[in-house]
Image (cartoon, rainbow, N blue to C red):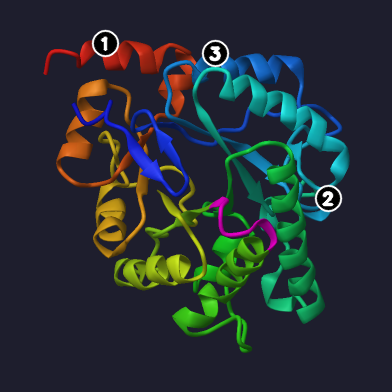
Amino acid sequence: MLLNKELKLKNITLRNRIVMPPMAREGSSDGKVTDNLIEYYRLRAEYTGLIITEHAYVSIEGKSTPKQLSMADDSVIDGFRNLTDAIHKENCFAIAQLNHGGKERISRDWLNINSMSKEDIEKVKEDFANAAIRTKKAGFDGVEIHAAHEYLLTHFYSPLANKRSDEYGGSLENRLRLANEILQEVRASVGEDYIVAIRFGAYDYWEGGSKLEEIPIAVKSFIDSGADLIDISGGLCRSRNPYSKEPGYFKELSKIAKDASSVPVILTGGVKKARDAENLLKEGYCDLIGIGRAMIMDAEWSKKALKSLENI
């Protein structure tokens, strides 16, 4: 059984291939962790290899929703420490996802990336780096940069949104530049021993958007910039594939990424059954399986899934 096989990820060893991916449950009005949120994650950590917590904003201008978690100042660290302690007590590891909302900010106003100044861009990079330091102080085993869905870094990556004429627009290298510079600054801030992941919106599924043949180049650039883990999702199409509802509906993207990658790759999308998770691993689409909505519905999904596959 591959689903129950250990996987070494930098300086840790995951006990199985099950990942709880980031899904917004939301903390409180001040962005801090609540006791209810701690218990929610603790219950799902018991038989799970890795939890990536829901996206936390790196700055107030990057906040997406009213009760979104914050990683924007040091006042949140103690609450997150209680959360990571609870997850670790269940023999599970934890990575914090960081995000800048871009278009999806709380105000719902467009953040026009094409009019962002160099000072604006420098602040975004600094905010990610400072937030990553807080994740380390809070006891997380790593940090994930959110570069997927309809958020800031996807706007830079997608030619549908990025119309800049400077070094952050035009060519693929330029459209990847901000994500790679953030990875580099985060790596420099947290050190070599800390896990750095990126959730990559690998494909828009829209005409004129990002291209499948760009995925290997993007993945290799992320690894060169310090990424230890590639977490595949959708681009401007967000977290759903508009053309498929099959289990692992981003598997085409994750297979391209895995074939180009020297680090583990996570596939998330529509996987609800243990047998489907096992088959996706066996068929080489990914190294780890993200179980999202099914784990929201059933805190014991991991336990039941592993039990159901014991005799195969």
Q: Residue at x 45, y 79 (%)?
A: 172
Numbered label tally:
3
Q: Nearer the viewer, mark 3 or mark 2?
A: 3
Disc 3: which residue: 43
Query: Marks 1 and 3, Cα distance to the nearest angstrom?
Result: 17 Å
| 224 and 234: which is toward the camera | 224
Question: Callout 2 environment at 10 Å: few (<14), some (14 to 19), or many (20+)?
Answer: some
Instruction: Tell me if label 3 and label 2 are in contact, CB under 8 Å.
Output: no
Q: Tell me which segment is drawn in magenta.
A: 189-195
Disc 2: which residue: 60
Q: Residue at x 47, y 84 (%)?
A: 171
Residue 128, by quadrant, is: bottom right
Disc 1: which residue: 307
Q: Secondary structure at mark 2?
A: helix
**Quarter of the rendering occupied by the N terminus:** top left
Please state the horizontal and vertical placement of residue 155, each as a whole percent of the image: 58, 65
Question: Callout 3 environment at 10 Å: few (<14), some (14 to 19), or many (20+)?
Answer: some
Please state the horizontal and vertical placement of residue 89, each as a whole percent of the image: 58, 18
Q: Residue at x 26, y 60 (%)?
A: 256
Q: Secondary structure at mark 1?
A: helix
Residue 194 lies in magenta, yes or no?
yes
| 9 and 178: which is toward the camera | 9
Query: Marks 2 and 1, Cα distance to the nearest angstrom?
Result: 43 Å
Relative to 305, is 64 on the left or the right? right
Please state the horizontal and vertical placement of residue 178, each as a whole percent of the image: 61, 72
Residue 235 lies in magenta, yes or no?
no
For marks 2 and 1 on the same chain, the one whose residue lies earlier in the sequence = 2
**Quarter of the rendering occupied by the C terminus:** top left
